[in-house]
Amino acid sequence: TSVPKRLGVVGGGAIGVEMAQIFQDFGTKVQLFEGQERILAEVEPEIAKQLTAVLNDDPRLAIETAAKIAEITGKPGEMKLAYEGSDGKKHSFSCDYVIMATGKRPALDPLQLDKAGIATEKGVIKADNRCRTSVGHIFAVGDVIGGLMLAHTAGQQGRVAAATICGEDMVYDETKDSGVIFTRPEAAFVGLSMEQAKAKGIDAAEVKVPMSIDAKAMITNETHGMIKIVADKASHRVIGVHFLADHADTLIGEGVMMVAGEMTLEQVGQAIHPHPTQTELFGELARRLGSRLRRAEKRKK
């Protein structure tokens, strides 16, 4: 099988972006089309914007946001995408193949949920934070209940359901869930962004630094990207960690423990991280934000 010379990708979520970069690496000219104003809606906005710039740096990959696909015509090997661009004008892109990566939705009809009296909402099964449906003895986990449709999310929900059935006290908390976009550099997140915290009525603050200030990143010449920490102002508890970096899939693990363990900035800042490693940035960021919040608190007194 030969690699296509030109490829259209419709959808700027994780799958679309990952596949676009993979084929670009194979030498294919790729154009990605996203209907929203930015790619990767699940990723912190500034990090998504930075990743877009990094991806667009490659001459073989172009990202078109706010694009409205009007028509896809032709046959495999000779296809054409007609679309309205962000400029409001009509454009077309000729390619060998088109990948449709516009998301997924649960196929609930075959389950005949109405016969069991199980309620649905917006195309997914309605379940509480213990994964219990509207029928008390029936539980649902994974993609069928919506939210983050990720393997580790479904696994955790399965454990919550099993624990609840066994009489244990365990809940699924989406505000502590995580994800990784396997691009180069990788984008990773756990917990809330500033935007999400504000929507939930949390008075939060954030701190960020570019990866270029990190000694290990300089040594390995992996200086693309940034790291952000989001914390609750009142408690100083870390409620979100957001990464754009090489090896973010590994680095985010420490962020997961911070958020899941409800660690404070002071606890993270006092931890001794080895040098030179990229994990040093966690301590540096925590100390910066903690100091800033304490100064603000003193000024109020």
Image (cartoon, helix red, strand yellow):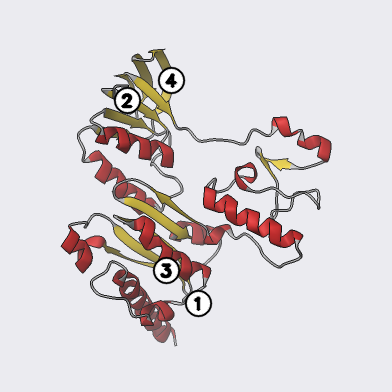
Residue 86 in sight from this viewpoint: no
Of residues 69 and 150, the one drawn nearer to the viewer in this rendering: 150
Which corner quadrant of the image does residue 279 belong to?
bottom left
Question: Does 159 sit left or right of 194 as displayed?
Answer: right
Q: Secondary structure at mark 1?
A: loop
Q: Which residue is mark 3?
A: 205
Cα–Cα gap, marks 4 and 2: 17 Å
Task: Give the mark, 2 or 3, whose residue is nearer the N terminus.
Answer: 2
Compared to residue 153, the image places residue 107 above or below, namely: above
Q: Secondary structure at mark 4?
A: strand
Cα–Cα gap, marks 1 and 2: 49 Å
Cα–Cα gap, marks 4 and 3: 42 Å
Residue 104 in sight from this viewpoint: yes
Task: Report x, y in % for residue 77.
Answer: 34, 14
Which of pointers 2 and 3 indicates the residue nearer the eye? 2
Q: Which residue is mark 4?
A: 70
Query: Residue 7, labelled with which disc?
Result: 2
Task: Give the mark, 1 or 2, whose residue is nearer the N terminus.
Answer: 2
Q: Amino acid at mark 4?
A: Ala
Of residues 156 and 192, the one drawn nearer to the viewer in this rendering: 156
Q: Amino acid at mark 1?
A: Ala
Q: Which residue is mark 1?
A: 234
